[in-house]
Image: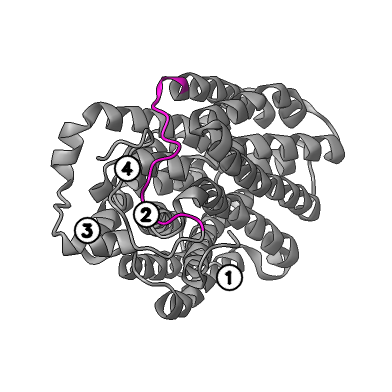
Amino acid sequence: MFNWTSTQRHVALACFACWMLDAFDFFILVFVLSDLASWFKTDISSVSISIMLTLAVRPLGALLFGRLAEKFGRRPILMVNVLMFSLFELLSAWSPTLAAFIAFRVIYGVAMGGIWGVASSLAMETIPDRSRGLMSGIFQAGYPAGYLLAAIIFGLFFNSVGWRGMFLIGALPVLLLPYIYFKVPESPVWLAARERKESVALLPIIRTHWKLCIYMVLLMACFNFFSHGTQDLYPTFLKVQHGFDPHTVSIIAICYNIAAMLGGICFGSLSEKIGRKKAMIIASLLALPVLPLWAFASGSVLIGLGAFLMQFMVQGAWGVVPTYLTELVPANSRAVLPGFVYQLGNLIASVNATLQSRIAEAHGNNYGLAMAIVAGTVAILIGILVSFGRETQGKTISGYDNGDRAGPAPERSASGAGR
């Protein structure tokens, strides 16, 4: 990282910040589910439908913004994306009814769906090839960093501003736009592809690589159940099942999101040494022995420790995903296909919050049991699916090596054979 150029560092920071602030806006909702239920005079499972729908429409955003990014470039579409999700986060604060709130969250979900694919392609196509595992971990750490920021803001300001004020604060990512405009250049790989007039048609790529696409969607469904299944209802678990006050909930959330950031960077970097597949399998399977402490312990200290270890493993596995998907797909589909399959996986996993809340309510509000069932199942499935996948470590994308100032070179596979 210290050998990166200033431009590469600006790109890395901007892409990380976009994903972090997008996640921040999403996770504000999970901290105020019970408060929204009280305000709109309904139950938590009814409000959690807004989470399900937000996740369900994200494939539309990935497809829309990804296609635009393949055609017009990563940078301008990323800016449009940030503007849109900030606007609809702001509108969420003014919802007069639950129906209006859900409608705003649906449109927000479309905007949110575009960020991951566009930002990750810009990052992976700009930073040095040997740093891609590290950048993958850093970029994906933006997700728990957003959760961490939401936890801090919730702990500091919720009692003063209420749930509407939380969503007003969530509109602040719009301030990122000037930084992107002045400091972040277009992807050099996209510029080179435009000069070669490469086709960006998506359907031929999907038809040619349909088995790979199905594999990636299934893998991303498991990964999204893994993350959302261990995060979305955890604040509710802490507040409802254990009766912790907002300050305690905030402290625990801060701790497990620091762990998530560390896990993503650790396993992302480790994947450069042991391979992408081994890193993901190790992290996901190590979550299994943590389940009893994470879901069934009592007392804030033990629960906090379990949450710390769980999110280190969950986001450790996730830390390899951005680079793994980028390396799996063809060059002329990186802005759209990784994000699209990721969000299709999210679509399958969008039932998670409602599913877990229904299970919990059917067992006397035992959210720990509901979360443990989901997390344990998908941890095993991830290990199995990844074992059948292709190793991609060592694939050339940007043509830059650490310290190299040369322009993008022709892509080469992990084995070194030209594409």
* CA gap, disc 2 and disc 4: 9 Å
Which image quadrant is residue 181 in?
A: bottom left
Q: Nearer the viewer, residue 51 or 276?
A: 276
Residue ID for mark 2: 399
Residue 395 in magenta stretch:
yes
Residue 239 horizontal/vertical position (percent): 73, 44
Q: Nearer the viewer, residue 391 or 170?
A: 391
Residue 80 horizontal/vertical position (percent): 34, 69
Q: Is residue 309 above or below residue 132?
A: above
Quadrant location of the C terminus in the rendered image? top left
Q: Earlier in the sequence, mark 3 or mark 4?
A: 3
Local packing at callout 3 (Cα closer than 10 Å; few below 14, some 14-19, many 20+) is: some
Q: Residue at x 52, y 22 (%)?
A: 383
Dot 1 amino acid type: Ile
Residue ID for mark 4: 412
Residue ID for mark 3: 193
Q: Is residue 179 above or below residue 415?
A: below
Quadrant location of the N terminus in the rendered image? bottom right
Q: Is residue 302 left or right of residue 67?
A: right
Local packing at callout 1 (Cα closer than 10 Å; few below 14, some 14-19, many 20+) is: some
Quick one: SS at disc 4? loop
Q: Earlier in the sequence, mark 1 or mark 3?
A: 1
Q: Nearer the viewer, mark 2 or mark 1?
A: 2
Q: Earlier in the sequence, mark 2 or mark 3?
A: 3
